[in-house]
Image (cartoon, rainbow, N blue to C red):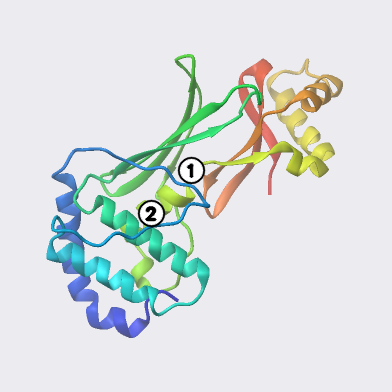
Amino acid sequence: MYLKKNFFSLNNKLLLSILPIIFVSCFNNTKKGSASVSEDSPIILEEIGEYCNSDTSFFISECKNMLLKYTEEREKKFLLQLTETFEKFSNKVLDTVLYTTCFIETNEKLDTIKTRIFEDRDSIIVHSSWVKNNKLLWEKKITNPYIWVDDDPFFENNKWITFTTGIYYAPPNIYKIEDFIRLKEWAVGLGLNELQELDSSIDRESYEQYFENFNGNLIEWGDPESREGLFIWYKPLQRFVVFYRP
């Protein structure tokens, strides 16, 4: 996959000596970065300017060399994402905020989910939240988000890999409910069971009616490799309930 074993064995001492310097440099700048990620947006690699030191240039050059070695689209895509992340944050604090717009309650008004990805001591934290009318309605925190890239040791215990994963793969995913209408009966049963544990007065007929009239989006969250399922907003109790669980 991304790096061959012989490359890592010959260059691990050099790489491991360089990365701590890079991470220290990030803490010397307290300016928060921001980014907006779209699955369909192309990743643009800009040429390294004068602000980059030799350590930064080395890492970028190695990532670009790896791009020449692999043909799988998924691998190349992650390497492009890793390169762009490093270019943007090599001289900054590892801290950025993404905003996801969607229809949580109704399709008449857009809602915004805020996701902050940041370094806290030795961990990368992904904190998503939804605030409306100055009230926190929902939040979810993930520590060290993981996505399988390759068995090569280069992709183990590397905060740049984790930070890149946090930016591109850890924020909630948004789906149209009509794309999952075939799961209606199952979804009603799952949601009703959860709701009745909270309020025994809720009956199937009332929840089915709510379900039929719901025109918002479904939300998926959790660690990229182990998403917790799809969730639907239940306005009467001001909470998400399960729609589908894998």
The answer to whether residue 85 shows anywhere in this view is: yes
The image shows residue 173, relative to residue 139, as above or below, that is below
Extreme residue in the right direction: 205
Q: Residue 14: give x, y in percent of width and height.
A: 18, 74
Q: Is residue 3 left or right of residue 190?
A: left
Instruction: Residue at 15% x, 51% y: name it.
Output: 25
Occupied quadrant, residue 218 = top right
Residue for badge 2: 164
Count neighbours of disc 1 (C-alpha within 10 A) and say few if under 14, some if 14 to 19, many if 20 or more.
many
Mark nearer the N terminus (1 vs 2): 2
* Location of residue 216 with respect to 187 vertically, above or below: above
What secondary structure is marked by label 1?
Answer: loop
Q: Left or right? Give the position of 124 relative to 246.
A: left
Q: Residue 242 location in percent, x, y?
A: 68, 35
The three-letter code of the residue at mark 2 reads: Thr
* For residue 192, above or below residue 161: above
> Which residue is disc 1 drawn over?
171
Residue type, label 1? Pro
Q: Is residue 185 above or below residue 6?
A: above
- Where the N terminus falls, by quadrant? bottom left
How many residues crowd mark 2 within 10 Å: few (<14), some (14–19), many (20+)? Answer: many
Q: Quadrant of residue 12?
A: bottom left
Depth check, front residue: 213 or 138: 213
Q: Is residue 159 visible?
A: no
Question: For residue 215, which numbered disc appears in the image?
Answer: none
| Residue at 86%, 21% in the rendered image | 205
Q: In whole angstroms, how far apart are the C-alphas of marks 1 and 2?
A: 12 Å
What residue appears at the point 60 percent right and 22 percent down from the top-left corner? 109
